[in-house]
């Protein structure tokens, strides 16, 4: 019975724990400090209250501290690390001097603040050149600057959302369709507020049922000779 009670106590624990500061783990993906001459180092040096922390540039004084940039240049990356998602609030990102062969679609999902992205010359800007105000090349790198709003209604970037929904940027060339109140559900076809209480009740009942099943199974195993 003690194990069952412990399980019930631990179930809500992930919801109660405070979130770690954004990008806390991604700053150590590559050894050393910001590389001299990287777009992140230059951006960080030119911004007041900004300073380096590992391969990150952070804005001090903000609560919580804001991650402004991430320098992953010359890190021998052959693919984008999953931890890159921790830097979704970054304004500037450097991926140059890496043997990257592709930037998979959706790699920058949620990077709505990104305004300066440096990639190896062999790669194009995520979302295509139309997703950026300015694309330039210098030596072996390509710089994508000024992320455009895919929802701005331009002929090239406009994205259709279903009726009763509004388009919202979700990264370079990426969007999400948010239901207008009071609509919700698939393609925002359901009208009225979302049934929070019934949903939570069903979720709680299912969780409790699974916990009881697990407890009963473990108890039978413990009593078996």
Image (spheres, helix red, strand yellow):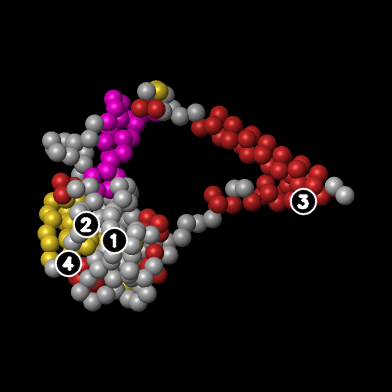
Instruction: Report x, y in % for residue 3.
Output: 74, 51
**Viewer-proximal residue among 193 and 164:** 164
Verify CB contact (< 8 Å) between mark 1 and mark 2. Answer: yes
- Of pointers 1 and 3, the one earlier in the residue sequence: 3
Q: CA distance from mark 3 to mark 2?
A: 56 Å
Give me the disc on residue 79. none
- Above/below status of 116 relative to 56: above
175 magenta-colored: yes
* Residue holding disc 2: 123
Left or right: 118, with 184 as reference point:
left
Instruction: Report x, y in % for residue 116.
Output: 21, 59
* Residue holding disc 3: 2
Residue density around tag 2, few if under 14, some if 14–19, many if 20 or more, within 10 Å: some
Q: CA distance from mark 3 to mark 4?
A: 62 Å
Q: CA distance from mark 1 to mark 2?
A: 8 Å
Verify CB contact (< 8 Å) between mark 3 and mark 4. Answer: no
Q: Which residues are magenta?
A: 161-184
* Residue holding disc 4: 140
Q: What secondary structure is marked by label 4? A: loop
Task: Determine which quarter of the picture holds residue 70.
Answer: bottom left
Verify CB contact (< 8 Å) between mark 4 and mark 1. Answer: no
- Of pointers 3 and 4, the one earlier in the residue sequence: 3
Please tell me whether mark 1 or mark 3 is closer to you in this view: 1
Q: What secondary structure is marked by label 1? A: loop
- Above/below status of 106 relative to 200: below
Q: CA distance from mark 1 to mark 3?
A: 51 Å
* Residue holding disc 1: 100
Verify CB contact (< 8 Å) between mark 1 and mark 3. Answer: no
- Of pointers 1 and 2, the one earlier in the residue sequence: 1
- Of pointers 4 and 1, the one earlier in the residue sequence: 1
């Amino acid at each position: 019975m003690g194990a069952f009670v412990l399980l019930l106590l631990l179930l809500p624990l992930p919801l109660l724990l405070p979130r770690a500061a954004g990008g806390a783990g991604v700053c150590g993906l590559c050894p050393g400090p910001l590389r001299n001459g990287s777009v992140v180092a230059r951006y960080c040096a030119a911004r007041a209250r900004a300073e380096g922390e590992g391969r990150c540039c952070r804005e001090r004084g903000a609560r919580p501290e804001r991650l402004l940039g991430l320098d992953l240049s010359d890190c021998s990356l052959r693919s984008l690390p999953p931890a890159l998602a921790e830097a979704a609030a970054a304004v500037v990102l450097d991926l140059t001097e890496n043997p990257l062969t592709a930037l998979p679609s959706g790699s920058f999902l949620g990077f709505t603040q990104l305004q300066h992205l440096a990639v190896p010359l062999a790669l194009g800007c995520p979302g295509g050149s139309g997703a950026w105000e300015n694309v330039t090349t210098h030596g072996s790198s390509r710089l994508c600057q000024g992320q455009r709003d895919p929802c701005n209604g331009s002929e090239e970037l406009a994205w259709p959302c279903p009726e009763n929904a509004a388009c919202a940027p979700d990264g370079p060339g990426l969007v999400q369709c948010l239901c207008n109140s009071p609509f919700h559900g698939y393609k925002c076809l359901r009208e009225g507020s979302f049934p929070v209480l019934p949903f939570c009740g069903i979720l709680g009942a299912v969780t409790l049922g699974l916990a009881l099943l697990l407890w009963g199974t473990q108890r039978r195993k413990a009593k078996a000779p």
